Image (spheres, rainbow, N blue to C red):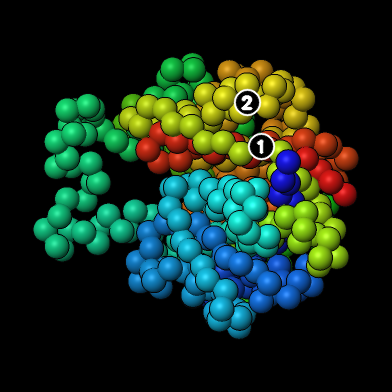
Amino acid sequence: MAEAYIIDAVRTPVGRRGGGLSAVHPADLGAHALRALMDRTGIDPAAVEDVVFGCLDTVGPQAGDIARTAWLAAGLPEQVPGVTIDRQCGSSQQAVHFAAQGVLSGTQDLVVAGGVQNMSQIPISFSMEAAQPLGLPRSPYAGSKGWAARYGDQTISQFNGAEMIAAQWGISRETMEEFAYTSHQRALRAIDNGHFTRETAPLEGVEHDEGPRRDTTLEKMSGLKTLVEGGRLTAALASQISDGSAALLIASERAVRDHGLTPRARIHHLSVRGEDPVKMLSAPIPATAYAMKKTGMSIHDVDVVEINEAFASVPLAWLKETGYDPAKTNPNGGALALGHPLGATGARLMTTLLGELERTGGRYGLQTMCEGGGQANVTMIERWS
């Protein structure tokens, strides 16, 4: 059976909105991770067969197939193509899937996967806003007869979905604030202890993730207004708006042999599932159950989990359903502290998961994240070196 290996993975620091990376052109932001990846692997860039990048709101400087633009902006060979994909917040995790599937199919040997997003320049959902001057509705669902027949006029929003999850799983604001505080503390500890040093390529004088707050307290969190009137979630319980990029090199057994590469991990499992698009953010729960069934494993066989902290209610509901160990879930903090540069987050999570497996000596790592449309990818890797 064919195998797909992760040779290396690298990311930029995650910049805070308006922070040190905010003025960097998205193509240059992506190019930085790509150049760093080529330098670290020592691979001949001309041997790469495709560049698969995730990115949302592909307008303005993020338009025009930024996977291709970033590769060229990095000064890398023109004969290497690129493709940009959108599976919402899971876009660069899906990029890893497509890259690995190309290798597993035997049609490709070396593929770069990753993602980029500059949310300081292109705000979240800006592509929806851009439709309004054309007289088109902002919502992608408005005006669809098929959608209306199936889901009516229910409010479709990530904020509404996060609130629905908190209510369904009985997760209090206080519990979510404790989780968010822990996320910041873990992220700060990881930075201070150098856990991110190997995976991060400094850029524009930014050496560390800018999101984690040393002055965060539970008292400060308790004083914030809720995002939705009568709700439980506040800005402290939602992922931070951020800028960043990440990239991984995926290789076949033949490429490993022919190019003298040393794998860091083997792709063990790839899957993606969908659920209620109105609730939107709960799909990691059934997606994880599906992955465990497909692999014949128990969640407790997994040594480390990275689940995106889009909102605090999402990983907390997942923990309640799976019974997994909270101490091994996002052990270096998550998006509540580190930020969520939409199209890059999937690759950033995989980069951090790989490093944590190596640091702790774990064997299996699992990554999952909620995505627009009620979807969730699950990727499992096995540490190899």
When asked about the image quadrant of residue 210, the answer is: bottom right
State whether residue 316 is above or below residue 343: above
State whether residue 345 is above or below residue 160: below
Q: Position of residue 144 (x, y in %)?
A: 17, 40
Query: Which residue type does callout 1 highlight?
Result: His
Q: Position of residue 177 (x, y in %)?
A: 56, 32
Residue appearing at x 68%, y 60% in the figure: 109
Q: Quadrant of the N terminus?
A: top right
Residue 63 seen in render: yes
Q: Position of residue 334 (x, y in %)?
A: 63, 43
Q: Nearer the viewer, residue 219 or 24?
A: 24
Query: Which residue type does callout 2 highlight?
Result: Lys
Residue appearing at x 57%, y 65% in the figure: 51
The numbered disc on residue 294 is: 2
How packed mark 1 is, by other alpha carbons closer than 10 Å (few <14, some 14-19, many 20 or more), is: some
Query: Disc 1 and disc 2: Cα gap in Å?
Result: 8 Å
Q: Which residue is mark 1?
A: 269
Q: Secondary structure at mark 1?
A: strand
Disc 1 to disc 2: CB gap under 8 Å = yes
- Residue 229 horizontal side relative to residue 197, left or right: left
